[in-house]
Amino acid sequence: MNEIVREFLLETHENLAQLDLDLVTLEKEPTERETLARVFRTLHTVKGTAGFLGLPKLQTVSHAAENLLSRLRAGELAFQGDIASTLLTVVDAVRAMLASIEATENEGSVEYGELIQSLERLTRENAGPVGVKPAAPPRAEPPPPSVRSGPQEQQTAAMAALPSAAGQSLSLEPADGAEPRAAAVSDSSIRVDVGLLNKLMNLVGELVLARNQIMQCSAAQGDDGFFGPVQRLNQLTTELQAGVMKTRMQPIGNIWAKFPRLVRDISVACNKKVRLEMEGKETELDRSIIESIRDPLTHLVRNAIDHGIETPADREARGKLPEGRLSLRAFHEGGKVIIEISDDGCGIDPVRVRDKAIAVKLITPEQAARMSDREIINLIFMPGFSTAERVSNFSGRGVGMDVVRTNIEKVGGSVDVDSRLGEGTTVKMKIPLTLAIIPALTVTSDGDRYAIPQVSLLELVRLEGEQGQHGIEDIHGAPVYRLRGSLLPIVYLKEQLQLDHSTGANSGLNIVVLQADERQFGLVVDEIHDTEEIVVKPLQKQLKGIGLFAGATIMGDGKVALILDVLGLAQRAHVVSEVRERSTPSKTGTSGIIVGDRQTVLVCAARDGSRIGIPLSLVARLEEFPSSSLERVGSNHVVQYRDEILPLIDVARALRQCDRAAAGSHGADRDDAGEINDLSSVQVVVYAVPNGHVGLVVREIVDVVEEAIVTRARARRAGVLYTAVIQGRVTEFIDIEKIVRTVDPELFEYPTPA
């Protein structure tokens, strides 16, 4: 049986048992508002799920009952005995349909027209406010014949398939001549409180620690008589651990199973074509995490279709296929579970986000001018913020993305957005290690032990003697090791932990080859020990901000070892790019580049002698062209570059043009554009725009520096974000997008298909 249907049957049977009790209670105490609300929620859930699973009879009956309950809840009707009898008949009808679904995979041939008519008749009656009219005794008339008469044998047979749900007594032995009934869903499953599972998991974790300590003692004593029982304890503990963990783990496919229908319905409602791709459905997560990410995933899928993916006509106008792509991907990386939701839609426009944030007074124009695109996009996580021009059935109320972040952070995770205008958006959720038991490699650095999750481990390398002394090469200040012809970046654990970096004169090197964010690097440690199963304990909040540790564990000798966060370690060592989200502007007090933060900056000299800075992350390439390769197109210069025509913009001239535009003057620049030809060669900073690339012409590319920005001031002219002191010199950080838009706005328009 389909797992979703099985879960629906199990949950609904439990809810129906509670419905019986609640309806009887309401018949005696018709003013019990909380009980009435619970009955309404239960039937509302049944109706919604029945519609999702394609069960029209069940949906129609529960919908009619929901309408009646809606008037009762609003105080427009009084709960009376005839209403109680009819609703109890609804419960019996739902049970019969569930039994038929389980036995024959359909709702059966029984029709419930008269029951629906009775519900509609009661709904139309206006009996005054609740409590005014006393509850009447149940009517003597029989329930609707569609339930009690007609094909009664079919209904009875269907209900017989689930006697416990229908209120019949259970018998351990079949009656004489009767066929033993098949086990029902409700008989084969039992619900256990998650708190009890958590306690059981903690106890198993402590048992694993005790097992590790006993095995260490056994190995040290060398008692053969003690060896057998210890091995048996080890085997039983391993099996118990696997069983308990399996009770908590669920494949993420259980959540994803509802998305094909969801995507289909939303895309039809939005007049869009969307192809759903899912990868990694077998990735297992803890049940508590599954519940925490269910709603965030649903909201992100809705947003991707409603806001991200364009209509077929718009996509074709932009040179895309008329059918959009929505991808869900889950995988393990660096001891974490990574979940990505990607679309190839229009992306997030940082300009639109910035303007809306200013309009709703979330940030000031001065703050916005200093913000990077990445920081602006992260404003979508602020409570109540939405760029939607209208409220649709699926989004636009500004109550979604902040809930996404809140729910993910509750389980210690993080959420990051990467969006390219016109290309699409990817939302990446990182779920950290929670209380679990994992295999890990233990290493030692400066006398302290650390654990490395085995999921990030690729291989171990030992360099002896001369190779240990000279095997590590230095390329542009970065240590690397040639591993089978490839350069492997090297990270020293002592250096990252700010420990003593000295090594013995003749000592070898131990390199643990790891992978983080699809990049490999070698971690140099003092000693490498064995691989063993460890119990992951969460870190206290005082240590979570360090970024180097994913948790802690207790080793077999009772000492504590920290678990290394492989991805955080790689980011700290600049092996992979920094992707962890920063605080919002309201928390930092600044935007874009944060005061005191170390940044990698390209420093150039413009033709007017000013010194300009560009964050290196914005630079596509650095090029130098001979002036003879420059060509004229109208009043501008271009150069043939990598199978495209690269427009050239003189930064100094563009800044003057921005100043004139800000002052309201549109006269011609006194400097002729042909001055570029006076140089023997032209140094160019290549910057990516939607139409391809644009070249920013400077007099000289001075240096690439990594420096903490300590002193900064507001801009003194248009086209400049702010000024800061870099290498002891005042440097202007230019607003590249504003400069390019001022000189040639068409560079930011999307290409029209041929």
Image (cartoon, helix red, strand yellow):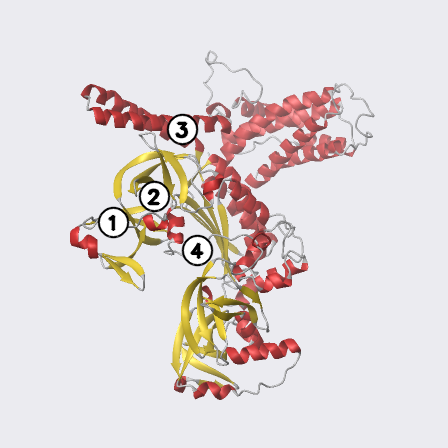
Q: Reading the chain from its start, which is encountered first: label 1 or label 3?
A: 3
Q: Position of residue 117 (x, y in %)?
A: 72, 32
Q: Which of the two discs, 1 and 3, sits closer to the camera?
A: 1
Q: Position of residue 66 (x, y in %)?
A: 68, 34
Q: Which residue position is annotated with label 4?
A: 578
Mark 2 falls on what kind of element?
helix
Q: Which residue position is annotated with label 2?
A: 455
Residue depicted at x 64% and y 36%: 60
Three-letter amino acid code at disc 2?
A: Val
Determine which of the numbered discs, if any, sits on residue 587 in the image.
Answer: none
Residue depicted at x 27% and y 61%: 474
Q: Which of the two discs, 4 and 2, sits closer to the camera?
A: 4
Q: Which residue position is annotated with label 3?
A: 244
Q: Reading the chain from its start, which is encountered first: label 1 or label 4?
A: 1
Q: Is residue 130 left or right of residue 317?
A: right
Three-letter amino acid code at disc 3?
A: Val
When the figure is inspected, residue 251 is found, relative to residue 649, above or below; the finding is above
Q: Position of residue 391 (x, y in %)?
A: 67, 53
Q: Which residue position is annotated with label 1?
A: 503
Mark 1 falls on what kind of element?
loop
